[in-house]
């Protein structure tokens, strides 16, 4: 039995080394969120699912229902003030909101802050579009799988019927990317 002890200790040491090499057991790479890679997914009109049913109280206390915006293209950006890529893309979204006025509206969904932190984030970055306060991320469950915005940040383009037409998983690559996605959806006949 004593000759097996070194083998057992070696096996335990190898197991411990392998376990310690896994620095992030929950899959978030040491962050408090799952970062997306900026992948752009466009959904052909015939493959789109039912309209998204998202509503809630905004950070400023107003009620916002995406169903009220049907007939227009809507951009939904999922964010959190502790997310570095969210801070980087917020000015792009604000610039896009100005450029797309008349073609689309932008709405945010703040999923992780206190209302005070969310409002401070908006003020600090001069964000003019409204954001639904969804601290528990419940509204994200209303987006159809596999096109639900589960990465941080995520940007969804809804067509005029309120269906997911495009999804950017992670930080927007550029304002131009968003503008072109929206213009493509706005040009559709459906």
Image (cartoon, rainbow, N blue to C red):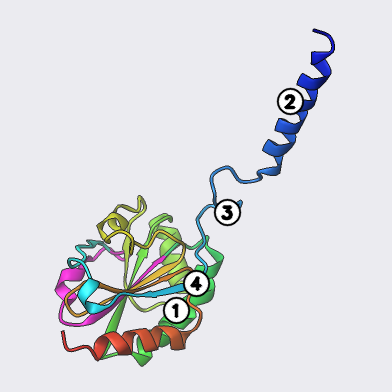
Residue 184's label in the rendered image is: none
Residue 125 against residue 102 in the figure, above or below:
above
The residue mark sitting in front, 4 or 1, is 4
Element type where label 1 sits in the image: loop
Residues at marks 2 and 1, CA–CA distance in whole angstroms:
55 Å
Q: Residues within 10 Å of mark 3 (few under 14, many from 20)?
A: few
Circles 3 and 2, Cβ within 8 Å, touching? The answer is no
The segment highlighted magenta reads 58-78
| Residue denoted by label 2 | 12
Give the mark nearest the N terminus, 2 or 1.
Answer: 2
Which quadrant holds residue 19?
Answer: top right
Q: Which mark is residue 38?
A: 4
- Residue 95: image quadrant is bottom left
Residue 176 sits in quarter: bottom left
Determine which residue is flagged by label 1. 126
Above or below: residue 3 compared with residue 68: above
| Position above or below: 87 against 82 | below
């Amino acid at each position: 039995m004593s000759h097996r002890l070194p083998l057992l200790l070696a096996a335990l040491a190898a197991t411990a080394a392998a376990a310690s090499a896994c620095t992030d057991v929950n899959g978030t790479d040491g962050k408090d969120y799952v970062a997306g890679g900026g992948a752009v997914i466009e959904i052909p009109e015939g493959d789109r699912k039912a309209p998204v049913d998202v509503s809630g109280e905004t950070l400023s206390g107003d009620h916002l229902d995406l169903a009220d915006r049907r007939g227009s293209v809507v951009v939904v950006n999922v964010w959190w003030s502790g997310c570095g890529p969210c801070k980087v893309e917020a000015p792009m979204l604000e610039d896009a909101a100005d450029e797309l006025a008349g073609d689309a509206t932008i709405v945010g969904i703040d999923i992780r802050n206190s209302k005070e932190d969310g409002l401070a984030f908006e003020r600090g970055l001069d964000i003019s579009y409204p954001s639904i306060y969804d601290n528990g991320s419940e509204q994200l469950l209303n987006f159809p799988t596999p096109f639900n915005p589960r990465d941080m940040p995520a940007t969804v383009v809804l067509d005029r019927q309120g269906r997911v037409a495009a999804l950017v998983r992670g930080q927007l690559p550029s304002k131009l990317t968003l503008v072109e996605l929206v213009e493509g959806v706005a040009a559709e006949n459906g």
